[in-house]
Image (spheres, rainbow, N blue to C red):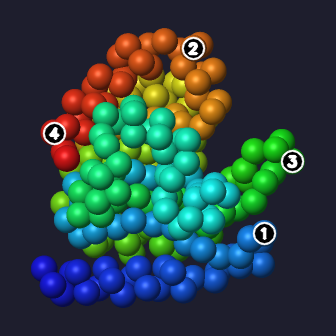
Amino acid sequence: MQRNSGSLAKALRDVHACRICEAQLPLGPRPVVQLGSTARLLIVGQAPGRKVHLTGVPWNDTSGDRLRDWLGIDCETFFDATKVALLPMGFCYPGVGKSGGDNPPRPECAPFWHERLLRHLPDVRLTLLVGQYAHRYYLDLGGKSSVTETVKAFSTHGPHVFPLPHPSWRSTIWMRKNPWFEADVIPELRKAVRKCC
C-alpha cells in the first residue's frame, strides 16, 4: 500500500510540474487535480475555470456547488481525497473562447496523464463522467450522441459509470427543458454515491 501511495505521490508531483501545453495557456500552467489511492468515487470533469485556476481548488465555484447538490454530498466529503478523486479532462484553465465560455479542455492532457494516474486508484467503485468531453473520451457512443441522449440513457452504461451534464449555469436552463433529469437521474445518482462514499 505504501509503495502504491509513494508512486501516486510521484505521479502527482509530475502532474504539477507538467508544461506540455504551456504555450497555449493564457494564465500559464496550474494543474488542478485531487487524487487519493483509497478514493472510491471518481469524478472526471472538463477543465478548471478561471476561479479554480486562481485558488487551485477543484470545483471551487458555482458549478462545484451545483455538482455537490446533485450528488447529495457535503464539501468535507467532496474535498476528501481519500474518498473522492477529481480528475479533469484538461488539468489547466484553457482560457476563454469566442463564445465567451471557456475553451475546451486541452487535448494533450487526458491521453498523456489519465491512464498513468488511474492505475493508482484501485478502489474506485463509481465513476461520474461530467460533460461531453468526458462522455466522448470514456464511453463508446457509437457515433455522435448529444449530452442529453447520453445522460438520458445513463442506466445503459452500467452501474459503475454515470454520465452527467456539466453543472455550469447553462445546466439550469437545460434542467428546465429536461425535467426527467431531476425526477429520474438525480435520485439514482444520489443512491449510487451513498453506496460508494
- Quadrant location of the N terminus in the rendered image: bottom left
Where residue 14 appears, as percent x and y from the top left, is 47, 85
**Which three-letter amino acid code belongs to the residue tagged 3?**
Lys
Answer with mark 1 or mark 3, whichever residue precedes in sequence: 1
- The residue depicted at 58 percent of the width and 29 percent of the height is 171
In the picture of the structure, the residue carrying the numbered disc 4 is: 195
Q: Write down the residue under mark 3.
A: 98
Per the model, the C-alpha gap separating discs 2 and 4 is 28 Å
Q: Position of residue 83 (x, y in %)?
A: 24, 57
Disc 1 marks which residue?
26
Residue type, label 2:
Arg
Evaluate whether residue 176 shows in this view: yes
Residue 142 in the image: above or below residue 17: above
Q: Amino acid at mark 4?
A: Lys
**Contact, mark 1 vs mark 3 (Cβ under 8 Å):** no
**Cα separation between marks 1 and 4:** 40 Å
